[in-house]
Amino acid sequence: MKSITILGSTGSIGTNTLDIVQRFPDDFRVIGLTGGSNVEKLETQIRSFKPRAVAVSAESSAAMLRKRCSDLPIEILVGEEGIAHVAAMPGAELVISAIVGAAGLVPTLAAIRSGKHIALANKEPMVMAGKLMQAEAREHGVRIFPVDSEHSAIFQSLEGHRLEDVRRLILTASGGALWTLTKEQLQNVTPERALQHPNWKMGSKITIDSATLMNKGLEVVEARWLFDISESRIDVLVHRESIIHSLVEYEDRSMIAQLGLPDMRTPISYAMRYPERMPLDLPSLDLTQVGTLTFCQPDHDRFPCLNLGYDSLRVGGTMPAAMNAANEVAVDAFLNGGIRFVEIADVIRSTMDAHVRRDITGLDDALEADRWAREKAESLVHALSR
Ligand SMILES: NC(=O)c1ccc[n+]([C@@H]2O[C@H](COP(=O)([O-])OP(=O)(O)OC[C@H]3O[C@@H](n4cnc5c(N)ncnc54)[C@H](OP(=O)(O)O)[C@@H]3O)[C@@H](O)[C@H]2O)c1
């Protein structure tokens, strides 16, 4: 029986994780859960999984939850501090990090510093402060298991091989909801259209990131730190079917890949029970049904955000954190009708152009770059808003 805490339990990854727990009640015990503002869903999860403590982001949500759960023996905490407290709570061996965005950095680091292994879905902290997170993980004897399907595929394709034999990593990209649109058509894309991902059901922020290909830019940075490999040895290949989840090319030009139907429960369960594989009751991949797998190069002209990820790594230091914050602000503005789809890349690029890079020597450097870039991006969004 493994004790786990789930950060972001009310989201898409959080819900999939709890689905696995429900299917394997003898294998996992839930110690802590955290949510943002979806109090109703969190209450349902509390009643089903009986954690010792939960945390939510705002005082108003905590007050509502306390009222709804007054008949239960549960500690309800609030704010970033409360979420970090639950993340570091004694008793859990593994923390599923599944908050969306920079909000996950402090809690995930708190979990690492308290010696808990991490199943990492929340890629943004790794983008903001990957070097720091890896250094802290080493210091505290913590393993970080990737949950992102691409990184899980690479992790699996590296098993049993020597890192020094790796020639390059190849991240596959579905291309997102708008891959077939022309540059002109992209000008008038609505949030509803951009949210129609062809293969994956995910939260709205990552779905827009997939449509801009910023998700792949973030994943390049994530891979750089997860696998300690320079960005010049990380390639991206568009593979619309999302069947090959990523590949590793070795020095002898062999390629090893991981395949499967697009279902996040596969990479989540691998991170939860590594090195064991869980007997998930999911449909098998039938390659005769799939028939053809297709591949092509990313189109940097229509989707400039992927290159921003590479650029941020070349500059280094606080630049990836600034890029990430600008992206969060721009995606939010697009979803709320403030800017156009194509302006997301403009906001990020202009924020990066204005950012003065500093070294990341500690958490405060990443947080300060995040704060600065949010302010800058907000002012750019304000200027663009009609
Ligand atoms: N979904 C996928 O298939 C997938 C695949 C690979 C990687 N990822 C990564 O996994 C992470 C989660 O993605 P998702 O799709 O599960 O997102 P999501 O469905 O939007 O869920 C996000 C979770 O974070 C919580 N949250 C939001 N803002 C918060 C804040 N300020 N403080 C504390 N909690 C907050 C939400 O709470 P409320 O809902 O209660 O407000 C929810 O529990 C992202 O980093 C994403 O890139 C996701």
Image (cartoon, helix red, strand yellow):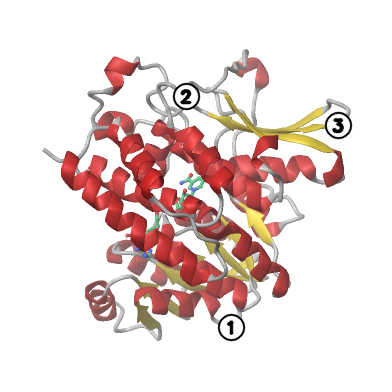
Mark earlier in primary sequence (3, 1): 1
Please provide percent x and percent y for residue 241: 55, 23
Please provide percent x and percent y for residue 317: 55, 56
- Inspect the image, locate mark 3, and give the three-letter code of the amino acid beneath it: Glu
Q: What element carries label 2?
A: loop
Label of residue 300 in the image: 2
Circle 2 Cα neighbour tier, 10 Å, few/some/many (<14 / 14–19 / ≥20): few
Where in the image, quadrant-wise, is ligand 1 located?
A: bottom left
- Inspect the image, locate mark 2, and give the three-letter code of the amino acid beneath it: His
Identify the image quadrant of the N terminus: bottom right
Above or below, 229 against 169 in this view is below
The answer to whether marks 2 and 3 mark residues whose Cβ atoms lie closer than 8 Å is no
Can see residue 338? Answer: no
According to the picture, the residue beneath numbered tag 1 turns out to be 90
In the image, taking residue 213 as reference, residue 91 lies left or right, namely: right
Q: What element carries label 1?
A: loop
| Alpha carbons under labels 3 and 1: distance apart | 44 Å
Q: Nearer the viewer, residue 260 or 323?
A: 323
Viewer-side label of 3, 1: 3
Mark earlier in primary sequence (2, 3): 3
**Which residue occupies 28% across, 57% down?**
375
Q: Is mark 3 on a helix, strand or loop?
A: loop
**Which residue occupies 57% across, 23% down?**
239
| Alpha carbons under labels 2 and 1: distance apart | 46 Å
Count of numbered marks: 3
- Inspect the image, locate mark 1, and give the three-letter code of the amino acid beneath it: Pro
In the image, taking residue 265 as reference, residue 165 lies left or right, namely: right
According to the picture, the residue beneath numbered tag 3 turns out to be 251
Above or below, 308 against 382 in this view is above
Please provide percent x and percent y for residue 322: 42, 53
Above or below, 360 against 247 in this view is below
